[in-house]
Image: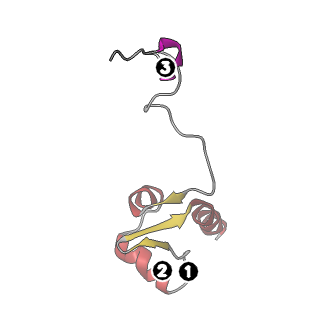
Amino acid sequence: MKLLINKKSDTRPKSGQGSTASEAPAYDPLTLIRFRELAKILPWSRTTCWRRCRAKTMPSPLKLGKNMIAWRRKEIEAFICQLDRR
């Protein structure tokens, strides 16, 4: 039995066309950010961030799984703007 492949139905982008892994994703304020990205934004250690979360002086993270947490980007940006005003 012979399989026929229709070359026109191949929807993968050719080289030089379409999106690539190196392109930056569009900005989305509803994005969740993990601690590694948060550490690039804030000048504090992991311990200081947790102390501020417990003291309610910083947005609390969302628990995404047993060993995974993330913060809402929108809340972190609002928090940074609030810090700048002080």
Q: Nearer the viewer, mark 2 or mark 3?
A: 3
Nearer-the-camera pick, 53 or 61: 61
Q: Are marks 3 and 1 in contact (CB under 8 Å)?
A: no
Alpha-carbon distance for marks 3 and 1?
53 Å
Q: What residue type is labelled 2?
A: Arg
Q: Where is residue 21 in the image (x, y as percent from the top left)?
A: 43, 33
Alpha-carbon distance for marks 1 and 2?
5 Å
Q: Is mark 1 on a helix, strand or loop?
A: loop
* Residue 48 position (above or below residue 34): below
Alpha-carbon distance for marks 2 and 3?
52 Å
Q: Do the residues labelled 2 and 3 touch (CB within 8 Å)?
A: no
Q: Which residue lies furthest to the bottom in this view?
A: 55
* Residue 36 position (above or below residue 23): below
Q: Nearer the viewer, mark 3 or mark 1?
A: 3
Q: What element carries label 3?
A: loop
Nearer-the-camera pick, 72 or 4: 4
Q: Which amino acid does label 3 sit on?
A: Asp
Q: What residue is at 51 percent from the left and 86 percent from the top?
A: 55
Looking at marks 2 and 3 on the same chain, the residue that comes earlier in the sequence is marked by 3
Q: Where is residue 69 in the image (x, y as percent from the top left)?
A: 43, 69
Q: Are marks 1 and 2 in contact (CB under 8 Å)?
A: yes
Q: Which residue lies furthest to the front in this view?
A: 1
Magenta stretch contains residue 9? yes
Q: What residue is at 41 percent from the left and 63 percent from the top?
A: 35
Q: Position of residue 39 (x, y in %)?
A: 41, 60
- Residue interval drawn in magenta: 6-12
Residue on which disc 3 sits: 10
Residue on which disc 1 sits: 57
* Residue 4 position (above or below residue 85): above
Residue on which disc 2 sits: 52
User: Quarter of the image holding residue 44?
Assistant: bottom left
